[in-house]
Amino acid sequence: MSQSTITFKEFIDSYKESLGMEGAEQLIKQAISKAGIAHKSEFTKEEALKICRELKQHSGFIGIVGGILNSRIIIR
Amino acid sequence: MATQFATGIVTHEDSFEAGKEVATQAKEKLGELTPDLIILFCSTRYDYPAIMRGIYQVIGKEVPIVGCTSAGQFTTDSITKDGVACCFIASDTHQFYSGIGKQLKNHPIQAIQNASASFPQDVDGYPYQSALLFMDGLIGKGEETVMAASSVLGPLIKFAGGAAADNLRFKETAVFGKEQALEDAVSLCLITSRSPIVIAGKHAHYPISPPLLVTKAKDNVLYELDGRPALDIWKHYLREPLKAQGTDIDHLSLNELSKILLRYEAGLMTGKDYKIRFPLSCNPDGSFNFVCSILEGSVIRIMNSNNEDQLQAVQQTAETAIHLTRGRPLAGAVIFDCACRAMILKEQFAKSIEASQSVLGTIPIIGCETYGEIAMDMGQLSGFHNTATVVMLFPA
């Protein structure tokens, strides 16, 4: 994995502690789908930011974590 | 001077007198030093501003007070269910900046921004940053609040704290900060330190049900598991264990059921471990109110715990925390313990304090029982726990 790619696992790991594995997987798969991206194990920075944009639209901690992820990906 | 901890604990009926008495106890232990921060835990039966006035009368100046109402309070000297406990911290190795934010339920980020508006970015000579975070325990925004704090304050701060409690009454809880006691609020205290503060946490629950799919949930309300009302599912798995204890689950009121749920919580599978989620209460339609959001599509298991595991978890948490100090001398400890632990341990609860003390040694300890415990290391993306013990160690 290069610094400019973001893995599916990385997204899951960001949410699994608060949503559980299954909840995190469902959330990320939905976000990927809504972002119009094909499901895969690694995403470009641009794709990852699109996924974050979908996550940020959720209310509560899902949206907040989406915002944090967005910031972290931008500064990579 | 370095850092000095001094605690007090009382059960005085009158709020102002309780404040005076608890402060007098702590002041006598602190000697000539003046506290730089006061941590306050108390029962909801008190008039909180009167307690604060009592404390200020004893110390003669307005030192920042942070803390919350709790389901129990303890120090190395005593344990109370309806008392007041305080800790005076005097330090030239830590600096404290406190703030309070309102309307936490509807505007968590704004509440955190308001609470932290006066916090410095960096403090010369104090390179390590951590924060104490207290939130209203009944608004169902546990994880939101912690993540909002991380989002606003940045990833280089670690957090410890708790969700305020009201001795299992589930009516109202309050946090203390800036000489105020507020509901629907967050109280924050940024601590900048010369040596790192250590935070460790652990739960002691194990699953008693197979995995259950969350088929209907909204915000912090869980309606259905596997397509059936959540309460029906819970009853199914608890009927036999409770029968063995002489309790008929089908003849309990909603209020009685809510108290039982403190022990039989939900566990979100996170890989090898479980993240415990505490159902605060159940509703007439068979749904549960949790202390934080539950997502449809999540898979949970109903959990249980026993006294032995609870005591072991307390000891292991203290051992982990001590290990993380790398042998640095300590000034004191703040412990956040889930309100369920006292309910599970009953008369053995004192043993859990002894278990912590046996590991932490003779340092002063202050603690409270909460509706949610906060432990989040730098960079983590989840920090709100239930049924956990969180130990926060201050280096001397």
Image (cartoon, helix red, strand yellow):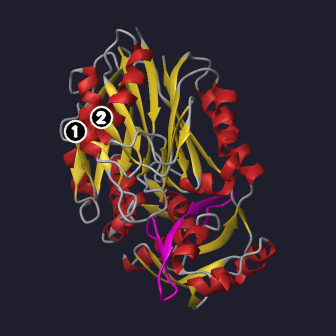
How many numbered marks does the figure carry? 2
Q: Residue at x 37, y 44 (%)?
A: B133
Q: Give the letter of the chain under mark 2.
A: B
Q: Quadrant of residue B234?
A: bottom right
In space, the residues marked 1 and 2 are separated at their CA atoms by: 7 Å
| Amino acid type assigned to the residue bearing label 1 in the image | Glu
In the rendered structure, which segment of residues is drawn in magenta?
A: B266-295
> Which residue occupies the foreground of this view, A22 or B225?
B225
Q: Which residue is drawn at 36% across and 18% down?
A: B90
Do the residues under discs 1 and 2 have CB atoms within 8 angstroms? yes
Q: Quadrant of residue B267?
A: bottom right
> Is residue B304 placed above or below B372 in the rendered structure?
below
Indicate left or right for B82 with B122 as reference.
right
The answer to whether residue A53 shows anywhere in this view is: yes
In the rendered image, the quadrant that contains the N terminus of chain B is top left
Disc 1: host chain: B
Q: Residues within 10 Å of mark 2 (few under 14, many from 20)?
A: many
Determine the secondary structure under disc 2.
Answer: strand
- Chain-order first, disc 1 or disc 2: 2
Q: Mark 2 points at which residue?
A: B65
Element at badge 1? loop
Q: Position of residue B157 (x, y in %)?
A: 39, 37
Residue corresponding to mark 1: B179
Q: In which quarter of the image is residue A65?
A: bottom left
List x then y, in percent, for residue B106.
Answer: 25, 66
Extreme residue toward the bottom, this view: B227
Q: Is residue B146 above or below residue B285?
A: above
Name the outermost residue toward the right. Answer: B244
Whether residue A76 can be seen here: no
Determine whether, in the image, residue B162 is placed left or right of residue B344. Answer: left
- Give the side of residue B235 with respect to residue B50, left or right: right
